[in-house]
Image (cartoon, rainbow, N blue to C red):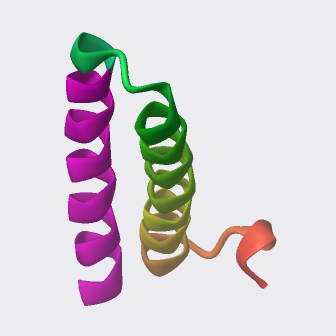
Amino acid sequence: MILAIILLIVALLSVVSFLKQIKIKNYFALAFSAAAALSFGFFSVMTIVCSLTNASICQ
């Protein structure tokens, strides 16, 4: 569960970075921020879901 919380914090920081890069119009950093937010967000949500439930996708 600690891993899920750390991944969620990184995903939230990536979203903040994404929003800042939109203002600056730095498209290269924007792409990496979006990719990081999506990947870390997915893994954090799935880690939390698998920890709390017994879903068939987790096995």
* Between 50 and 42, the one nearer to me in the picture: 42
Which percent across, then down, holds residue 15? Answer: 30, 37
Asked whether residue 1 appears in the rendered view, the answer is no
Q: Does 55 appear above or below 11?
A: below
Residue name at image x 71 percent, y 77 percent: 58
Query: Quarter holding the N terminus?
Result: bottom left
Q: Nearer the viewer, residue 24 or 51?
A: 24
Residue 20 or residue 36, whichever sits in front: 20
Q: Is residue 46 above or below residue 17?
A: below
Quadrant for the C terminus in the image:
bottom right
Does 45 sit left or right of 2 as displayed?
right
Q: Position of residue 57 (x, y in %)?
A: 78, 68
Q: Quadrant of residue 26?
A: top left
- Residue 50 appears at what percent x and percent y? 55, 74
Q: Is residue 55 left or right of residue 40?
A: right
Residue 53, magenta (yes or no)? no
Let me know if residue 28 appears in the view: yes
Q: Determine the main secondary structure of the stretch shown in magenta.
A: helix
**Residue at the image point whose x is 51% and y is 36% from the top:** 28
In the image, residue 44 above or below residue 12: below
Observer-nearest of 48 and 11:
11
Using the rendered view, name the quadrant where residue 51 is placed.
Answer: bottom left
Please tell me which residue is depicted at 20% across the width and 36% down the height of the picture: 16
> What segment is highlighted magenta in the picture?
1-21
